[in-house]
Image (cartoon, helix red, strand yellow):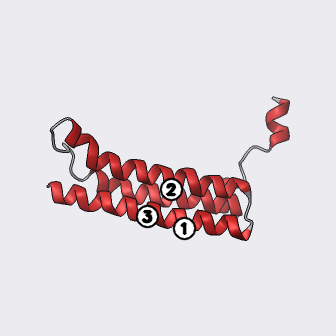
Amino acid sequence: MAETVSRWARRYVIVSALFLILWQGAALVGISRQTEVLLGVFGFVLHTIFGKAYSLIPSYFNRQLTIVPAPMVQFPLTVVGTGCFIGASVGFGLCRISSRYRLQPQEIASD
């Protein structure tokens, strides 16, 4: 059981490292600041926090993770969700549908 959680925690950290590389590559290319922030915060930081939380928090309290499939369920949801956020910020594919309803700065100021 602990090896399953550890395996999934490592996958979070590996994906986090990939998002870090994408973030730095995007900064070099000159992509928008919004996309850089999404890659950094949602891609790198949150995946690192999730991966380390699944491996460290149970050991701090001398317990095992009660719901073992939790990392398996959360992993694809966070990766796809982060990908959709980033896709929407650059106007890519199906993610463009969700960006159509995004508020523009002038609409926010007028409320």
Cα distance between the residues tagged 1 and 3: 10 Å
Instruction: Point out the residue furthest to the top here.
Output: 111
Percent of width and height locating residue 40: 57, 54
Where is mark 2, residue-wise? 44
Q: Residue visible at 73% across and 64% down?
A: 31
Tag 2 secondary structure: helix
The 10 Å Cα crowd at callout 2, few under 14, some 14 to 19, many 20 or more, is: many
Where is mark 1, residue-wise? 21
Q: Residue visible at 38% across and 49% down?
A: 50
Percent of width and height locating residue 48: 42, 53
Tag 3 secondary structure: helix
Where is mark 3, residue-wise? 15
Q: Residue visible at 70% across and 53% down?
A: 34
Q: Which amino acid is tagged 1?
A: Ile
Q: Which amino acid is tagged 3?
A: Val
Q: Is residue 69 visible?
A: yes
Q: 49 above or below 18? A: above
Quick check: 13 left or right of 88? left
Residue 55 or residue 83, whichever sits in front: 55
Percent of width and height locating residue 33: 72, 55
Tag 1 secondary structure: helix
Q: Earlier in the sequence, mark 2 or mark 1?
A: 1
Q: Which is more foreground, mark 1 or mark 3?
A: 1
Q: 95 above or below 69? A: below
Q: Earlier in the sequence, mark 2 or mark 3?
A: 3
The quarter of the picture where the C terminus appears is top right
Cα distance between the residues tagged 2 and 3: 8 Å
Give the quadrant of residue 53.
top left
Q: Which amino acid is tagged 2?
A: Phe
Q: 28 above or below 77? A: below
